[in-house]
Amino acid sequence: MKRMWVWAAALAAPLASAVTVRDDAGNAVTLDKPALRVISMAPHVTEVLFAAGGGSRIVGAVNYSDYPEAAKSIPRIGSNREVDLERIISLKPDLIVAWMHNSSERQIEMVRKLGIPVFLSDPQKLEGIPENVVRLGHLMGTDAVAGPAAAELRKQLASLRTRYAGRPPVRTFYQVWDKPLYTLSGKHIITDALRLCGGENIFDALSVTAPIVSIESVLQADPEAVFGTAEKNYGGVSLWKPYSTLTATRNDNLFTVDGNLLNRAGPRMIAGTAVLCEKLELARQHRNK
């Protein structure tokens, strides 16, 4: 009887260490043991993995995975749009963390066919960022780091919500690029950041996450504030200076922000949201000029 019990316990042992979490698409992701070799298929994912205590476990990452500094030395496996499957196989990952966007479905499906567990990271709300930290920390067995890191992010979010709750709304245009003129709709996490600060995205209702819009449509909506992300060789918010009838131009509310903080749904987006809130508060002050 004792020998049978030992045999049964041995069979059950691998299952005892298995862990299952839900990704942002609602899929169950199960690992028999903590992930030691992880591939990141988005820059924001790389930042989340580092925050969760798994930076040393990242064996491959896509282009533009440049934060923190240590991320720059991680071997590249391609870009957001196209990854090198042979390179991925050679790295022998036990977990792949991907970002679901318009052009990624095909390559994610190809990765799934390799039989490697895939976690989809696509936070739609700011609260989803610390939640991603917790869940990925759980998959890597780095809960001791991920838990406190997530708690600190939640504390920062709570502080911002308390500070800016009930502030007068500011109609806002968020400009990602100017040629063509790209913005982000209500489906993108940036709109949640704007809402926290009391901002109203003038293109909230559009069905496409990152739509191209016309200058005329922006002028017609007449936002009170315009945000542009700082990039090299990029015209930015200077595009709107000639339009003196635009409320944002007239009130001196053409703001430039760091796209690395706000266009990536990683931990630094909380700090980016604080900047958004400060700028929108400045726009409110300009009403009294």
Image (spheres, grey):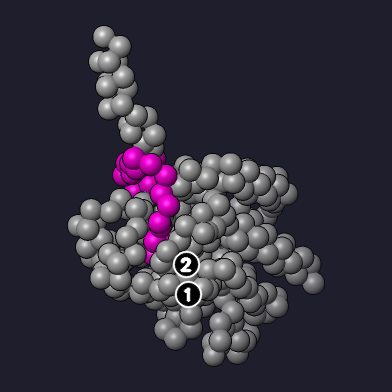
Q: Label 1: state its secondary structure.
A: loop
Report which quarter residue 21 is drawn in: top left
Q: Is residue 137 left or right of residue 206?
A: right
Q: Position of residue 48 (x, y in %)?
A: 52, 56
Magenta segment, which residues?
Answer: 20-41
Label drawn at residue 92: none
Q: Are marks 2 and 1 in contact (CB under 8 Å)?
A: yes
Q: Is residue 30 magenta?
A: yes
Identify which amino acid the numbered label 1 is placed on. Tyr
Q: Label 2: state its secondary structure.
A: helix
Label drawn at residue 43: 2
Identify which amino acid the numbered label 2 is placed on. Pro
Q: Is residue 228 left or right of residue 280?
A: left
Q: Position of residue 267 (x, y in %)?
A: 58, 57
Residue that protrudes farthest toward the right in the picture: 289
Residue that protrudes farthest toward the front in the picture: 3
Residue 174 seen in this snapshot: no
Q: Is residue 218 above or below residue 135?
A: below
Label 2 or label 1, whichever comes before in sequence order: 2
Q: CA distance from mark 2 to mark 1?
A: 6 Å
Q: Position of residue 4 (x, y in %)?
A: 25, 15
Q: Residue placed at 40% from the left, 73% from the top?
A: 76
Q: Residue placed at 38% from the left, 37% from the top?
A: 19
User: Residue tagged by mark 1?
Assistant: 64
